Amino acid sequence: MMETTTDAPSFARSRRPRRPEDPARIWAPLADLTEAAVAAAGSGTVAITRGFDRNSRLRAKALRDLLEQRDVPSIEVTPAVGSDRLLADVDVTAVVNLIGAESWQPYRIAAQLRAPVLSPKPGETAGEQVTRDVIALAGDSGKRDVALSHVAVRSEDPAGQLTLTYNGEQLTLTGGWLTVAVQGHELQVQVGGAGIAEQSITTAELRVETAEAPHRLVRDELPIADLEGAVTFTAEPEGLVVRPV
């Protein structure tokens, strides 16, 4: 008589799908980051900024899985040049920083999109929310960029001209330069040029027009463009919001 059993054959048992591992077990802060991202996202998308190392990739993937379980869309971006173009025409309502404090990218993206940065808390308890003034840059096309620390403009030719418009006044510099920082909700501007002593200007908005030669535009120590034409700098009070969670 043939024996019967209710056990599945070994080959069938081996094909049973494994229960998915809880992604939060990969890295403890993911649980709190997920809850904060869900709360901040609303009906928008969460941008996850990550590095290129294996740990950062795994954490970003785990966070995306957790957010997907909560029906919150997310997009990964990296410090690679052009990566933030993935966020064009996307309603980003929160930015998660998985890179750390060594990169300015999460903060610049957040300020540019007017979304909060969610970062892992430094200790056992969540830290206080921090806000910071930023500098908005806009060309005549209306395209907006953001500087977190400062901006510098310098003529690459002694004949180059800078025309500054601020507080109803105008100043033209030849072979000139300027630096723009933000403090107390206002722009702090230092300018100088051929035959003109260095001077300071305080204003909420500064329009800079170039002529005769290219000028170099440097944002937060990173040269980003040859400036030709005009750009307007504006102080944006509390334009950056960081929440340690």
Image: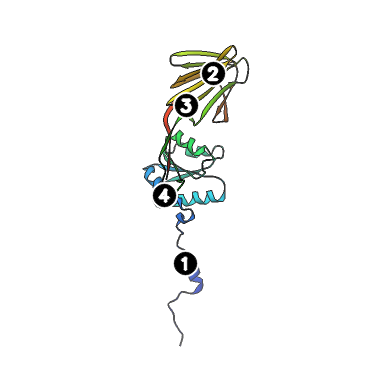
State the residue position of label 3: 182
Given residues 193 and 109, the one toward you in this image is 193
State the residue position of label 4: 32
First in sequence: mark 2 or mark 4? 4
State the residue position of label 2: 191
First in sequence: mark 2 or mark 1? 1
In terms of secondary structure, where does tag 2 sit? Answer: strand
Quarter of the picture containing the C terminus is top left
* 42 with respect to 79 (left or right): left
**Is 9 located above or below residue 45 in the figure?**
below
Measured in 3D between alpha carbons, the distance from the residue under mark 2 to the one under mark 3, in whole angstroms, is 15 Å
Measured in 3D between alpha carbons, the distance from the residue under mark 2 to the one under mark 1, in whole angstroms, is 70 Å
First in sequence: mark 4 or mark 3? 4
**Amino acid type assigned to the residue bearing label 3 in the image:** Val
First in sequence: mark 1 or mark 3? 1
Given residues 244 and 18, the one toward you in this image is 244
Measured in 3D between alpha carbons, the distance from the residue under mark 2 to the one under mark 4, in whole angstroms, is 46 Å
In terms of secondary structure, where does tag 1 sit? Answer: loop
Measured in 3D between alpha carbons, the distance from the residue under mark 4 to the one under mark 3, in whole angstroms, is 32 Å
Please state which of the two labelled residues, at mark 1 or mark 3, is closer to the viewer.
Answer: 3
* Residue 176 coordinates in the image, percent (x, y): 58, 17
State the residue position of label 1: 16
**Crowdedness near tag 1: few (<14), some (14–19) or many (≥20) residues, C-alpha within 10 Å:** few
In terms of secondary structure, where does tag 4 sit? Answer: helix
**Is 214 located above or below residue 85 in the figure?**
above
First in sequence: mark 4 or mark 1? 1
**Amino acid type assigned to the residue bearing label 4 in the image:** Asp
Please state which of the two labelled residues, at mark 4 or mark 1, is closer to the viewer.
Answer: 4
**Crowdedness near tag 3: few (<14), some (14–19) or many (≥20) residues, C-alpha within 10 Å:** many
- The extreme bottom residue here reads 1
